[in-house]
Image: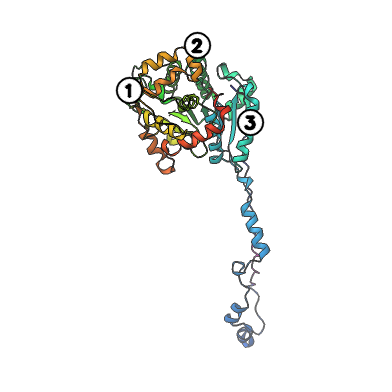
Amino acid sequence: MSTDSKNETHSPEKTKTAPRKKAAPKPVDAEKKPAKATKVAAPKAAKDAKPPAKAAKKAPKPDAEKKPTKAATAKLAKAAAEPVTEVKKTSTVSLITGFPGFLATHLALEIAKREPLGDLHFLIEKRFQAEAQKRLARIRRESPEFKGNLELIHGDITKPQLGLEPETYDSLRRSITHVWHLAAIYDLAVPEEIAFLVNVGGTVNVLDFCEACTSFKHLNYVSTCYVSGKRTGLIYESELDEGQPHHNNYESTKFWAEMEVQRRMDTIPTTVFRPAIVVGHSRTGETDKYDGPYYLLKIIDRMPKWMPFMNVGRGDTVVNIVPVDFASSALAELGLRDSSVGEVFQLADPNPMRARDITALGLKCLGRRLAVGMIPPGLANRALKNDAVEKMVGVPREILGYFTHDARYDAANTARALQGAKIKCPHLSTYLQTLVDYYQSHPEGSDSARRRA
């Protein structure tokens, strides 16, 4: 899903200023005898010598004691404000897949802030060119401190050598230091063949690229908490293959992809990230990915106001939701650390809300009455199997499992790693109204959700 771009790293030599030579003292002619030395040499020398106090008094003050003029002060301030281009260092040369997707865009903004002299190359499908150009302009606009290169490269992760021309592939192979692999099919109802081609086959091709790189330092692979499949109870970051079945082809193919990533971690320095359900920005509500809890908002919004709403099941299970600003900040912060290599981080809310509490708060935010009673999950699932019903409510039946499945995700490793960075996941109750406000003010977007991660 992208092409490569030629990137050159320059390390300009430092210009050294030769020290100013001090004037050599005049040699003393030791062999020359002074005339009439016995009569006048000593007295004359004493008479002509200036007292030390006077010499010190008349000596010019050193430059450091001089008070600088206003013009000199302004000149120094200007010089300090100007970037020192002579010492520019391109610390990271990144290749990002999954752009111009929602999470990849926010991740790029975070990397640009942290690596203002780095270079960002985006492997994209040609059909996303126009949207990708808009998002590059946004990165430049929102990260004015970023002075590196931004480049779109047409390619395809499902093809050998990422679908790149040999020259382009070789150029990237020699320059890339960091790879951020986010591209995936996120459709919960995706057919197995397509999901396997993109999620597993595409990941294998990215791994092959990383192994071929000559300046490579770090692969950041974005998996998902839901590789846990149908497991219940507390799920740790150190766990992956516990013999679990999965709810859908999205989960199973992301599981197999992470299995391959972890299998090759001995030869490819890698960090694995498992986000929970990613929603809009906690402060602005901005999103272009209307899934997860947005499906709940859709159902509530489309129901007549007089019709009472019912919970699906008892609503005791928790639903793990994180805002995109937390997910992207954690990704960039940990993904740029050498110490993160070999680690697995679950980007999850340590205090998730229960399904019925999310429903109650969602109803309140939309100005609706509280839920009355419940509908058994089995009955709701059978109803959504009817194509007409599924189309009417605009929700895939696969989403029900995420509101009724009792799985909790431990994020202790993530919390420890982020402790000094002051990056914390906000509680959903503090920003759900913001998500609802954005959803209501962007109704067009809510009906055209992207399903490309």
Q: Secondary structure at mark 3?
A: strand
| Main SS, magenta residues | loop
Pick whichever of labels 2 and 1 is earlier in the sequence. Answer: 2
Tell me: residue 29, above or below residue 156.
below
Q: Amino acid at mark 1?
A: Thr
The first of marks 3 and 1 along the sequence is 3
Disc 3, disc 1: CB below 8 Å?
no
Tell me, yes or no, whether the highlighted magenta stretch contains residue 27.
yes
Q: Mark 2 or mark 3: which comes first in sequence?
A: 3
Inter-mark Cα distance, 2 to 1: 27 Å
Q: CA distance from mark 2 to mark 3?
A: 31 Å
Q: Secondary structure at mark 2?
A: helix
- Label 3 sits on residue: 151
Query: On the rendered structure, is 329 left or right of 58?
Result: left
Q: Amino acid at mark 2?
A: Glu
Which mark, by number, is residue 221? none
Mark 3: few/some/many CA within 10 Å (<14, 14-19, 20+): many
Amino acid type indicated by mark 3: Glu
Work out how far the residue at label 3 is from the one at label 1, CA to CA, in angstroms: 43 Å
Residue identified by numbered label 2: 193
Q: Which mark is residue 232?
A: 1
User: Which contiguous range is marked in magenta?
Assistant: 22-28
Residue with the most extreme front position:
306
| Corner quadrant of residue 372 | top left
Q: Position of residue 212 (x, y in %)?
A: 54, 23
Q: Position of residue 169 (x, y in %)?
A: 61, 23
Question: Which residue does the image show at 37% across and 18% down from the upper left?
Answer: 377
